[in-house]
Amino acid sequence: MLHHLRAAGVSAVIDARGTGVPRVVHWGRDLGDLPDEDLAALAAATVPAVPPSSVDHPLAVSLVPTLASGWSGRPAVAVHRPGAPLDLDLRSAGGFATLDAAAGVAVETEVELTPQGVLRLRQIVSNVGSAPLAVDSAAVVVPVPDRAREVLDFSGLWSHERRPQRHRPPHGVWSRESRHGRPGHDDALLLTVGVPGFGFRHGEVWAAHVAWSGDSVSWLERSSLGVSVLGGGELLAPGEVTLAPGESYTGPWTVLVWSDAGLDGLSDRLHAWIRSWSAIDRPRPLVLNTWEAVYFDHSLERLEPLVDAAAAVGVERFVLDDGWFRGRGDDTRALGDWFVDADKWPDGLTPLIERVTGAGMEFGLWVEPEMVNPDSDLAREHPEWLVGAGTWRHQRVLDLTQPAAFDHVRDRLDALLSEYPIAYLKWDHNRDLLASGAHGQTRALYRLLAALRADHTTVEIESCASGGARIDLGILPLVDRVWTSDTNDPLERQSIQRWTGLVIPPEYLGSHLGAARAHTTGRTATLSFRLVTALFGHAGIEWDLTRASADELAAVTRWTALYRSSRALLHGGVVVRGDSSDPAWITHGVVAPDRSEALFAVVALGTAEGALPPAVRLPGLDPERSYRVTVVDVGAEPTVVQPRPPAWWPGGVTASGRVLAEVGFAAPLLAPENAVLLRCEAV
């Protein structure tokens, strides 16, 4: 039959009639409530001609395109039996299920269009034959229109994640593969194709994200056959998944999003969908993490003043980072020995936790359960639990696919969570796998997280992977926060948070206020720039407040109060980003769902191209309502270089949402690497 899925301005039409493999007729703008005869006419109208020197039937890019159907592009599903390749010739088995009876292979494509207009697909491959079946690929592909010519995805490095890259590929495959055993710092994140020149607020775009925390692949193929497709799925190593007769493999979901309102339109759908199933059910507590404050210098005497300073400025969660466990004096040893260090903590963690909770804060703890140092009791006692041969950051990978290793890690974490009132685990993952077997390791990680969450229902978990190397929609349902990057440098963070937020809502994005001199880059930033930048996310502090001045502490106290009073808006509103004619100046913000208020950051990343920067324009407001725009005191003043400020500064300006979006107002002359926070209130 013809299936017409509709939601939130999106249509997906799939033709599952006849004996062939179902094909996507249309995915994009809503086509309205079409009667059956109109759907049939649409399906017929999109059947292409047969060109010269080609297969003798019209080419249809199905949900599982194969060589037998005439598709010579990158396959979605590929299987083989040991010593014998299989060219699948799939036929309909009803609905979105297909079967090659002679080959003994069945494939079912699960399709879902969410109420937010997010399309999800995944493949289930079953061995219905009598011999083992190796699964080489079980990805999904969907066609996109020829007008989708420009590609945007991301690369990056440690502490420099989410670097956008755009180009217009010719015929061929633009493929992004992750072989890290995790998505990696260079993860493509969201492979987006669209009409040339699309931006944050304009242009038609189609995008794919593989919801998987191991090795993955996503691609655009512009075939000389005259069709273009988006594809994505788990990247399987040879022999990694072999099915016995009767067994099945279920691939991860590939999440597909369409928008006719640019990149912000993609975020609107993804954020609303994520919030529909998110486990976050309370305001995001403001965090202090001890890493850049004390590093490995742990003792009650060292940390008590920091606890007191954190409580005084308004911190709500105090997290003890690396260095608390047995024998851990630096990052070369003891990883995997998850017992409290009796030398640093002779009475256990209880005295520190009592000091933290007595000051009105929750207590959190850093762990890295998937890794082990060769110089550790665990590695010496169980060398058979280690994966691969080489070290990375003095670490080896612990093989969680081995039941004994899995049980050991689960039992040690369960013991810690049972003994101490730990509200939060910062769960780190500081190296690539660099070994085949990411499929089993990732599945084991998911089982471990699910088991701990089931047994300790109030504990929140953060996904940290040497910063932002494991941020994806496979792990997100199992965690409550992601560590966006190991850098707290606000200049780097402006870009990292801007692009990570394309997929992930701000309430998940850990964003910390660091010291004036950034630990990762050595760059020095003004306090106001650091405060404004850290506000837009799940805010926290990573700074030794015992060394801050009285004025700095007063500023931080005002900032934490601003965060608490604004987090319902920051974490429940619509994220908007302005398209800027000058890359050195950007505007981003969060608008309340009813558009009654908004917060915007106007940011000078560098020196403007002209003496007068482009006008500040505020997108996403109600065009028919008037707004009062005022400068918000974040606790510290931005640095400006203006002998005479614009006429509205700092008293504010009142205008309609349409005027603020289309015309805007004169920009303040911010010094490079500065930002100002603006509040918009409907009047």
Image (cartoon, grey):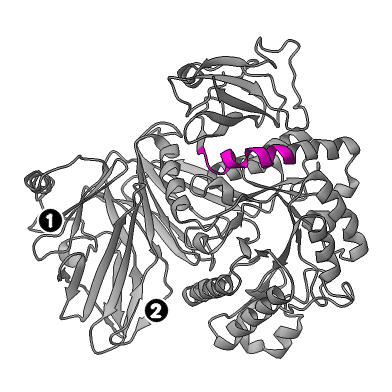
Residue 640 x %, y %: 74, 21
Task: Where is residue 643? Give x, y as percent.
Answer: 76, 11
The reply to whether residue 614 is in sight is no
| Residue drawn 27% across the image and 65% down it | 109
**Above or below, comparing residue 349 to residue 263 in the picture:** below
Secondary structure predominantly adopted by residues drawn in magenta: helix
- The answer to whether residue 282 is visible is yes
Q: Secondary structure at mark 1?
A: loop
Relative placement, left or right, of 261 versus 663 is: left
Label number found at residue 117: none
Specify start and end residues of the magenta stretch as a single range.
560-574
Count of number-bearing discs: 2
Where is mark 2, residue-wise? 241
Relative vertical location of residue 103 with respect to residue 635 in this rendering, above or below: below
Residue 25 placed where, x, y %?
19, 50
* Mark whose residue sits in front, 1 or 2: 2
**Tag 2: amino acid:** Val
Q: In this orientation, which residue lies closer to the viewer: 653 or 338?
A: 653
Three-letter code for the amino acid on which mark 1 is drawn: Ser
Tag 2's secondary structure?
Answer: loop
Q: What residue is shown with label 1?
A: 54
> In the picture, which quadrant includes the N terminus?
bottom left
